[in-house]
Amino acid sequence: MNHQDIPAGTDPKGALDAPRASGPAIPGSLEAMAGDLDREFASLNADERIRKAFAIFGKDLIATTSFGRDAGLLLHHLYRLGIDVRVFFIDTSFHFPETLAYRDILTSAFKLDLRESRSFEPDNRRYAAQKDGSLAIMDTNACCAINKVGVQAAFLGRSDVKAFLTGLRRDQSDSRSHTPFVHVQKGKLKICPFADWPAHDVELYLQIREVPEHSLAKEGYSSIGCSPVTCTSKPLDPNDPRSGRWVGDAKTECGLHLDYEP
């Protein structure tokens, strides 16, 4: 699968927990480093975790974002702390216009070094169809594999990427409830500095810092992915922010936070 990089809850099939090793990690291995950092990060705050990651990896550290509802949390931290890293955004070709507008707002506000990556397959939208007059995806797993998972694997596979920051949090869903601060994914160190942040603290931070809000959040969307009706709608369960994703499907994750395709 070719790609281009352009500058600019308990079901194990959905679980995002770091794989539990059958024995101690091999000294000096990536897994051992991840375990050591995870234990260290447990006693640090988010600012300290981000600064530590940048101190270790420097320009080989990147950040990833979908410019979803809470994207401003990570991106504002980077801006406020003066952490100058490349920010990778996957252009699936199915984003809401409001998401692309939000991308432009945050990129300008926080002076992001934004890199947009997308599938190089000319027929990457082949699973799209019309359903009751609305855009739908006939095979969401296959579509995510082409437009998300494969694209992510390509930029994580770069030699100048050693670790990546994400805004993943434990309270976002049952399947994310044991997300470590640091673990290995797709051969790179994945760092989740806000893993232990509750939604209330996120909202408080964004309000106090006056971080621009995604316009769809104002309309009641609590988790914002791609625009087809099969992929994103307003939440069905007010207590589950991701209950509007892949409604009617057993799918709970697109695959970006897994070490395998769902």
Image: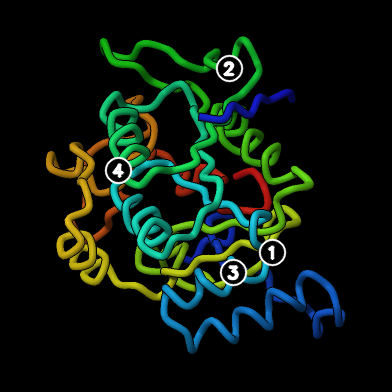
Q: Residue at 61% x, 61% y: name it.
A: 190
Q: Quadrant of residue 19?
A: bottom right
Q: Does dot 1 land on a helix, a strand or a loop?
A: strand
Q: Look at the image and tell me whether residue 248 can be seen.
A: no
- Camera-nearest label, 2 or 3: 3
Front tag of 1 and 4: 4
The reply to whether the C-beta atoms of the residues labelled 1 and 4 are less than 8 Å apart is no
How far is the residue under mark 4 from the one under mark 3?
A: 23 Å
Task: Please report whichever mark, 1 or 4, sits nearer to the chain's N-terminal start.
Answer: 4
Q: Amino acid at mark 2?
A: Asn
Amino acid type of the residue tagged 3 in the rendering: Ala
Q: Amino acid at mark 4?
A: Ala
Q: Position of residue 99 (x, y in %)?
A: 31, 32
Q: Residue at horizontal 34%, vertical 16%? A: 135
Q: Looking at the image, is mark 4 or mark 3 nearer the viewer?
A: 4
> In this figure, which residue is indicated by the disc labeled 4?
109
Q: Which mark is residue 53?
A: 3
Image side of residue 260 versus residue 192, left or right: right
Q: From what the image shows, is residue 131 above or below residue 231? A: above
Badges 1 and 2: C-beta atoms under 8 Å apart? no
For the residues labelled 4 and 3, say whether their Cβ atoms are less than 8 Å apart.
no
Q: Whole-Å distance between the Cαs marked 1 and 4?
A: 31 Å
* Residue 64: image location, x then y, percent: 51, 48
Between disc 4 and disc 2, the foreground one is 4
Distance between the alpha carbons at the discs numbered 3 and 1: 14 Å
Pointer 4 or 2: first along the chain: 4
Which numbered circle lies on residue 124?
A: 2
Q: What separation in Å lies between label 2 and label 3 (alpha carbons)?
A: 34 Å
Which residue is the site of mark 1? 184
Q: Quick one: label 2 or label 3, which is nearer the N terminus?
A: 3
Q: Does dot 3 land on a helix, a strand or a loop?
A: helix
